Amino acid sequence: MEDILKKLLVLRSPNIGPVTYNKLLSEHGNIDSVIEYLNLNQDFIDSVKREIDNANVLGITYISDDDSLYPENLLKIKNHPIIISVRGNKNVLNKKLVSMVGTRHSTLAGMNFISDLATKFAEHNFAVVSGMAMGTDTAAHTGALQAQGNSQTIAVLAGGVDYIWPLENESLYYEILERGLIISEMPVGSKPNANNFVQRNRWIAGLSDLLIIGEADAKSGSMTTARFALEYNKNIFAVPGHPSDPRSIGPNSLIKNGQATLCMSSKDFFEEEKTQNKKKNIASENEILDKLGMIPVSESVLANIVKKSVSEIKSDLVVLELQGLIRKQDGGYVLN
């Protein structure tokens, strides 16, 4: 812990990040000489000690980049964090990792797709990495936690590892602690700011070999994550969307430019089970299901497509909804 204290004394000093830290260490030879050069006052030293004490009380661990537990993929990134703080199950870091990101304003269909995909990855012993934001991130974490067995997930935060943001995800935060891990490079207790989110996105891209991007606006944090992933030569998969939806511009553009592989389902990553899904069997035989997808279709439009009256298809829609094959959304029906 003495080594961690010395490193934090340097890293918590104003205007010192990984670049300056390494420069100072190179110039002065060792951490003790750097601390002596900085001539830190006692109040500052006491504040760093209080942070460490608070971390101990909360069960938070500091992992230095010379520790065997430090994520191997992060070590490969230039100017990676010298120290990260973690809370939860540290063994998750030994798992295969997949990162999933997307807009906070995801559609229900988009969230369901990411959630189902995350469940599938968790069932294959992957830990799902995301940023615990609303929308797509939430879907990724909750999807991973829905898998049976030893399913786990990692949340990378822009504030301190103990600072829950957004507050709407407080219950999710504690669910992740039970079966996964919370990571941050920021001081314990610190609130996130705009610049921190960019760094957070950098580590989400860096932790995994594979990034999956769902719905995302052209200018968004998710696309920033994708740019970092491209810089790190990661494998990127993008979920396509309707051309007229601005939330589809990000993934669609990555696919169009050849920067990402088209992601249609878990089949892109795993072999499907030999037994056919009941829903697929029914879908091949039911003309209403054949005409539905992820874009809501109203009763009147659907009736016109299948050449029946609205009253004739109402009973069919009720049966299909009770079977869990379709659901109402935005005034129409979509596949469940």
Image (cartoon, rainbow, N blue to C red):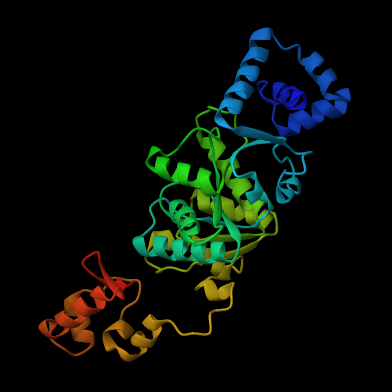
- Give whichever of 241, 181 is nearer the camera: 181
Query: Which quadrant holds the C terminus?
Result: bottom left
Q: Is 22 in front, or is 162?
A: 162
Residue in the picture at 16% in, 78% down:
300
Seen from the viewer's position, the closer of residues 122 and 215 is 122
- Image quadrant in which you'd find residue 230: bottom right
Taking 244 as reference, is 24 above or below it? above
Q: Would residue 26 appear left or right of 81 to someone viewing this image? A: right
Which residue is outermost to the top? 42
Q: Does residue 84 sit above or below 260 in this rendering?
A: above
Q: Residue at x 53, y 49 (%)?
A: 179
Q: Residue furthest front?
A: 149
Where is 259 relative to 135, above or below? below
124 or 332, nearer to the observer: 124
On the image, the x and y values in percent for residue 233 come to: 70, 59
Q: Is residue 295 left or right of residue 136?
A: left
Rendered location of residue 148, percent (x, y)? 50, 62
Q: Quadrant of the N terminus?
A: top right
- Give the left or right position of residue 58, taking residue 308 as reference: right
Residue 79 position in % (x across, y down): 73, 40
